[in-house]
Image (cartoon, rainbow, N blue to C red):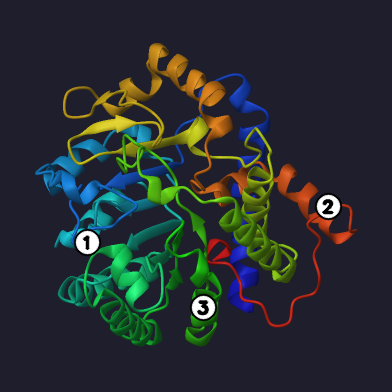
Amino acid sequence: MAMRVAQVIREIPSVARDLYENHVTKHFKVIAPTVLHVNVNLRCNTNCVMCSIWELKSPHALGIAQFETIFSDQVYRRIEYIILAGGEPTLRNDLAEIVEVMHKHMPRLKKLMIPSNIINRNSIEKQYPQIARYCAEHRIRLTLGVSLDGIAETHDKIRGVKGAFEKVMGNIAFMKELQKKTPFNMSIDPTIFSMNLHEMQKLNDLAKRLDMPITFQIAAVANDYYHNGDMDVLKIDNRGRLRLIEFLKRRIEESSLLDALAYYYAEVVENMEGASARGLPCPFADQGLLLNPDGSLQYCHNSRPIGNVLETSSSQLYHAPENIAYRDKVRNETCPSCRMSCLFFVSLRKEVLPFLSFVIKRMFGIHRLKWRKPKGSQPSAMQA
């Protein structure tokens, strides 16, 4: 409890700065990026049915020296939140070195998230303890995400790997033992679509038994990234849509009043019930970057590459007038229909008023997705 209070007190100056920059400064100048998504590879050791990255077999991968040069650019100095992903990040054996290089050039780094299918036990045993110790020593909040999409055979079929579920459960046990020695957060992050709608409650029950937070993420279509624009398996029929809506409504009711995850679920429900425009804020809309293993730089998954950092500096690419104009176009034309969660909890901190409005409406029963005092519900990994 004392650590929580101390953490809140430390955050007050940065929260005040965020509020000023996001409600005043951004109307007069371009805000430096604060969120960064780094794809360390575009290779994978599973054959997922909802994503085609594994088919790319991309040879591209930036080396440590290249990361050192790229991140020495001043545009990265104010990065606070990083997603270290792929492909499958654990296929690299230098993740700990990458983390150190990033932190060296990003002194404001607060939180690091590494999503993984966690079936590569050798890599996890070697690298996760190093990363966890480094983050604990430097007060970086680490969340290791577990991509678990179903129980037993369902998960194996979705991931296209026989025995994947058994490997995941064994590695969760290893990671929970690691947590006893070095503090970090761990969450279950299933991707929900037509093949696992029937197991959402089972996954929720499993998370409770494991005493782990769980975030149900609705499968997103991002053809330039997942290469899944024409996959029929992602389509949810009307019966499945109603099932998902009712399940998420229960999650909203049972969540704590200040749980940011309830805000995301409410957005999903509104969308599935016909809302035309996105109400969920997204930090990538005006202060984010996405770096690919070939050096190409994007504003987000829905952005085309704005250049290559191996040829032009990140600062030049980020601030180029033609790229800023393009980002404004994406924000106006693409963002309203985008349903990706995209670190929205960061935006709720930086643009807190929509979330406060949601909380107040739930508290007084004005919002139709009401809140009731939960019976021992779990905190969201997003709040950690």
Is the Cβ of the residue at disc 1 closer than 8 Å to that at disc 3? no
Q: Is residue 381 left or right of residue 117?
A: right
Q: Quadrant of the C terminus?
A: bottom right
Mark before the other along the chain sequence, 2 or 3: 3
Which mark is in front, 2 or 3? 3
Circle 3 residue: 202
Q: Secondary structure at mark 1?
A: loop
The residue that appears at 27% across and 40% down in the rendered structure is 71
Q: Nearer the viewer, residue 115 or 110?
A: 115
Question: Residue 46 — which label?
Answer: 1
**Dots 2 and 3: beta carbons under 8 Å?**
no
Residue 124, how many percent across, how many down?
A: 23, 73
Q: Upstream in the sequence, badge 1 or badge 3?
A: 1
Q: Which residue is mark 2?
A: 367
Q: How far apart are the two marked residues, 1 and 3, measured between alpha carbons?
A: 22 Å
Q: Nearer the viewer, mark 2 or mark 1?
A: 1
Q: Is 173 situated above or below 242?
A: below
**Callout 2: few (<14), some (14-19), or many (20+) C-alpha neighbours within 10 Å?**
some
Q: Residue furthest top?
A: 322
Measure the alpha-carbon separation of dots 2 and 3.
28 Å
Left-right relation of 341 to 143? right
Residue 162 image position (x, y, % from top left): 21, 74
The answer to which image quadrant residue 364 occupies is bottom right
Front-most of 384 and 305? 305
* 163 to the left or right of 274: left
Residue 190 vs 85, above or below: the answer is below
Residue 64 in view: yes
